[in-house]
Amino acid sequence: MTLKCVVTDDEPIAREGLMSYIGKVDFLEVVAECEDALQLNEVLKSQPVDLLFLDIEMPYMSGIDFLSDFSNPPKVIMTTAYEQYAIKGYDLDVIDYLLKPIPFERFLKAVNKAYDVISSQKNPAKEINYFYVRTNQKLEKVFFNDILFIEGVENYVTIQMETSKIMTHVTIKTILEKMPDNIFLQIHKSFIINLEKVSFVEGNMIGIGKYKLPISRTFRKKVLPVILQNRL
């Protein structure tokens, strides 16, 4: 992934220094350089930009004022000779704040941080809705939504689904750690249920499809509030 960058600083020497640093980093590409916020405003309206290197003290409008007024700006690394602006910069959600003169190692740390932040936004982690279990000498894919409940006996568990079941050599504690806790809930030392599959609660029993499963005394105080939180 290449980050498209704009360098904005009213000092030509400062711009040249940043451009030189950017040229040493393979994931950075300069698409424009600006002397002030007015030029920067025109650039941002004309092309996509991932990262701004933005000076604070500039003619016409400061970098702080520009960020405060601009709607949905790109990610920003501030560059300035004035340390007192740091808190205000972080209030505007800048990625980093570099004090001039800027050492290259400090610059590299800032742009690596920017790369991580922007990369995670462009490529958000996909939600995993399945896992694999070993059974009959193969790995079988199981979707969370297909599970009615899981029953554990010693070092084995049975994963019960609507029309089939899978037995695998693993403890119920281990498999519980793989389950999203907003969907699955342990109700007994031997049972984990899919909350979305519960059809009724009757005394100390939970109904899931054609099955009735016990709520143990140990888990009752934890289970009932979760089950009943959507009660009318």
Image: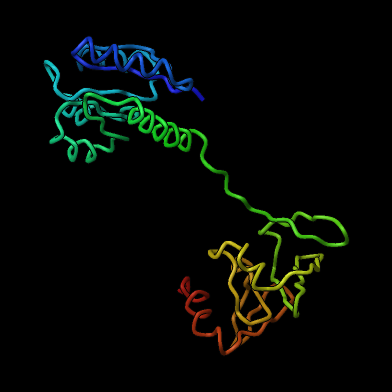
Residue drawn at the location 51% of the way across and 25% of the way down? 1
Q: Is residue 21 left or right of residue 36?
A: right
Looking at the picture, does residue 28 appear above or below residue 170? above
Which corner quadrant of the image does residue 48 belong to?
A: top left
Of residues 134 and 227, which is closer to you in this image? Answer: 134
Looking at the picture, does residue 61 appear above or below residue 163? above
Q: Is residue 126 left or right of residue 3?
A: right
Of residues 155 and 141, which is closer to you in this image? Answer: 155
Q: Is residue 133 left or right of residue 94?
A: right
Which corner quadrant of the image does residue 91 belong to?
A: top left
Of residues 210 and 215, which is closer to you in this image? Answer: 215
- Residue 194: x and y in percent read 63, 68
Residue drawn at the location 36% of the way across and 29% of the way down? 105
- Residue 40: x and y in percent read 26, 16
Of residues 139 and 22, which is closer to you in this image? Answer: 22
- Residue 33: x and y in percent read 30, 12
**Quadrant of the rendering where the C terminus is positioned:** bottom left
**Residue lying farthest top?**
12
Residue drawn at the location 63% of the way across and 80% of the way down? 206
- Give the number of callouts: 0
Residue drawn at the location 73% of the way across and 57% of the way down? 142
- Residue 79: x and y in percent read 24, 26
Q: How is the image coloured?
A: rainbow
Q: Is residue 44 left or right of residue 222?
A: left
**Residue lying farthest right?**
136
Looking at the picture, does residue 1 appear above or below residue 182? above
